[in-house]
Image (tube, coloured by chain):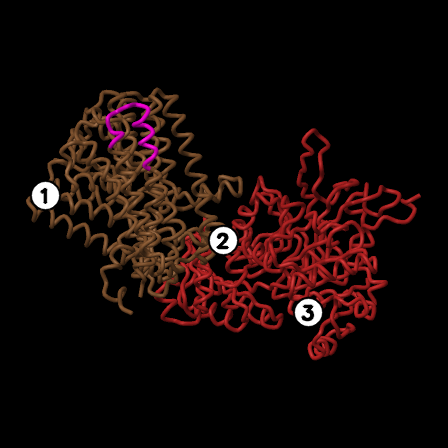
Chain colours: A brown, B red
Amino acid sequence: MPAPLAVIALVGRLTVLFALLMLVPLAFAWFNHDRAEHAFVVSTLITAVAGLSMSLATRRFRRELQVKDGFVLVSLTWTVLPAFAALPLMMAIPGLSFTDAYFETMSGITTTGATVIVGLDQLPLSVNVWRCLLVLVGGLGIIVLAVAILPLLGVGGAQLFKAETAGPMKDQKLTPRIADTARGLWGVYFGLALACTLAFRWAGMSWSDAFMHMCATMGLGGFSSHDQSFGYWNSPVIEAVAVVFMMLSGVNFGLYFVATKRRSLRVLWVNAEVRAYVVVMAASVLLIAVYLLAHGTYGSLAEALRHAMFNVVSIATTTGFASLDYAQWPVFVPMCMLLLGCFATCAGSTGGGVKMVRMLLLVKQSHRELVRIVHPSVVNPVVLGGEAVSARVMQSVIAFMMIYGASLTALSMVLVFAGLEPVTAFSAVIACLNNIGPGLGEVGPAGNYQGLSDFQTWVCTFAMLLGRLELLSLLVLFTPQFWRR
Amino acid sequence: MKIVILGAGRVGESVAESLVSERNDITVIDTDPARLQALQDRLDLRGVVGNGIQPSVLREAGIEDADMLIACAPLDETNLVVCKIAHDLFNVPTTIARIRSPEFETGAPLLEKTGFAVDQVICPEQSVTAYVRKLVRYPQALQVLEFADGLVSLIAVRAVAGGPLVMHGLAEIPSLVPDVEMRIVAIYRQDKALTELIGTTRIEPGDEVFVLAATREISTVLGALRKMDRPVRRLMIAGGGKVGLRLAREIHAEYQIKIIEFNPARCNYLATQLPPDVLVLNGDATDEDLMTEENVADMDLFLALTSDDENNIMACLLAKRLGAHRVFALINRRAYADLVQGSQIDIAISPAHAVIGELLAFVRRGDVAAVHSLRRGAAEALEVVVRGDRKTCKVAGRRIDEIGLPDGAQIGAIVRTIHDAEGTREVIIPHHDTVIRTDDHVIVFVPHKRMVREVEKLFQVSATFLF
């Protein structure tokens, strides 16, 4: 039986920290006098007070958390923090409902990048900074979650790499190894973030734009301070920088951590998942560029490659930036991009979706079954990185895929039931469940989620949360067994 | 020569067996008195019971004046330590260790005199794998042995009617297969060597012919003595032990391989260790249904490589009956090997002989670069480096017909370094008037083991050379 009160005590402390994070946009607001100072001051106070009172009211119940509490903690964190994050948006943007504000912050913190706000260019700078900062923090949270915490709970793709990663991850003890691991991961993450900011600035963005887009890139979120997203600059150099860092962020951060520890990039090169990720990305970009060229969308291969590269990488890594309205391309291409977004990124990265490692295992498993039909006595366990994958893990992967398929269908049906047109409904669920951002139709790269009714918005919000927490760690809370004493 | 052997296991036993017949003074150390007793009863050697890493036990075995120590205990660790002790404490000139781990190779810094002091590493699994690999590559050959770093090969092949040379005299060879230099060094008919090979000697079907030729000519030589089969593409290995695994790992790129292994856990291990194009099957190689189901009839080659002789023989017989093209069995017991060779089973592979050559090179006097034991130890082929000059050596600077080799022994090939910029080495198939020079590598075929001493003496540099 989990202890919700002990968890709330911890969430309270996290909320106080979160209030401190609000000081960043507050500082931006202060120096720019961008009419959002008031909103941030009030929200910071509310958040801090709420966090403190949560923490104080439950301090008698504080205790060492159990593994089961972890599920509650994770789900609660990812639902409570967006609520507080929504406060400044509601206050700074007139007419924004709580539903929409919560959708927006959930989209940020789950690094989805779907937006309900039109007129981003006219928003106060601090509000845009806050939206983007949520993506950065969400990305950080998810890496630590995926690499350090989810494996302990027995879900998430990163557990498959337990054997491959170095010392700290092999150990099953929660403390202090996790703290150690988390610190290392943060180091890598912030190192890359700094490099990304400098690169964007060098490529021609303003400092604040460079910072905001760095946040959105590192978290593979895809928020932008411009309605046109990267189309605002129309600069090949900026797009190239973004492509590089999106690709980097799509790799298991645990591997970077190991690579820096061993001072060798070999870990990355020999990793089966990373290889598959790079190959799939490169092949898709080439295929789509050639397809666009053949269809006469672009006159030259160079132009086709440039646009295909940026948009395909953006959607496939579940970022969701757009440099143009790719929905205008032949319909095969956006469909293909969305499909890639469902599985291309590596487990332990900031990307969403099924994750490449599960896809690899499924492909291998299918091949295995086919061989088995021809040779009944064959012994061919699924091998990943030189080690046999246990039947237990395979089962959990298959279960994940079933739940994934079921969620996809069920949520789409709910949206269609709620009156949404099927292409929009289906693509919106894919885009939210995989934390991509833009879908097709009404929610495509040129439109956004503003047109959705409140109910539809809540469904999409739930889909984002569900996808981000790798389905199982959220759904387990809905089973009666979990709460039984 | 005084030789101390540590460990009376399978390797130790076969090493002792091959060395004992050459008037070597052999002492075997083992912890198991029963084993030693059995060995002593069978072979003329001394047994010492005890733990070989204790200097007192080694001393009792007479290590102080031993010329060589061969450590073949089951554990790598023991072998390494014993070599170190023998070198540091007793100054044994030559130490040889059986090491299973592929991470130690002859010449590694760790094995030098300041390290573990191992002069030569032997790894039976590796030797057998290399040996089998050759046979897979040239499935028509009974044996392919390399000399002079692989430049020259000695090929044993059974002549089959239809080959261009079969039913012809040896003198006709140059006219029948021009462009290829080869030398037939011995012909065995019904297991007896023909005493004299002259121009009119005919090669008959069923003869076991030993030919020396440059390695690149192997296929031509084989084609001359029997019709060429289609090249091997599909092969089945029964037994996924160390040899089976090593072999599959080395050759999987060139062949379609199926491995049958009885132990499910081992199967899993094999499947993780081998690339996915190697099919690992769980089952018994003597299970007719499994074999039929896996199309043994379409196999170009069936290799039984388990550690059990009887199983290997039965699996091979079954595979042959079900239609496998050629079947090879790994057979440890000499009696079995003699029994089945040339019957239904095409080749009986003897692990002991694969490894013994490496040891013999150390036992032989003179500057011997390589030795291969043939026909299960009855005959031998040596690669000797000629030292000295006409005055000090009975070979250097002389024509071949002046040397006076024992009857039947033949110089089959000479590898000579041309002193140009690259140091190219050429292979010469000599005639009776070819003059041997200093520093030539001469490959001598010796049909009977008892002649080895005589040949050794010929090549030894006399004492006057030193002054």
Q: Is residue A21 left or right of residue B164?
A: left
Mark 1 or 2: the one toward you: 1
Q: Is residue B407 left or right of residue A16?
A: right
The residue drawn where x is 24% and y is 44% is A83
Say which chain tag 1 marks. A
Mark 1 or 3: the one toward you: 1
Find numbered disc 1 in the image and state the secondary structure of the residue it sits on: helix
- Quadrant where the image shows the N terminus of chain B: bottom right
Provide the residue designation for mark 1: A422
Say whether marks 3 and 2 touch (CB < 8 Å). Answer: no
In the rendered image, residues at marks 1 and 3 fall on the same chain? no
Provide the residue designation for mark 2: B249
Q: CA distance from mark 3 to mark 2?
A: 29 Å
Q: Position of residue A36 (x, y in %)?
A: 25, 29
Under mark 3, the amino acid is: Glu
Magenta residues span: A22-38
Q: From this viewpoint, is residue B383 visible?
A: no
- Neighbour class for label 1 at 10 Å: few (<14), some, many (≥20)? some
Provide the residue designation for mark 3: B13
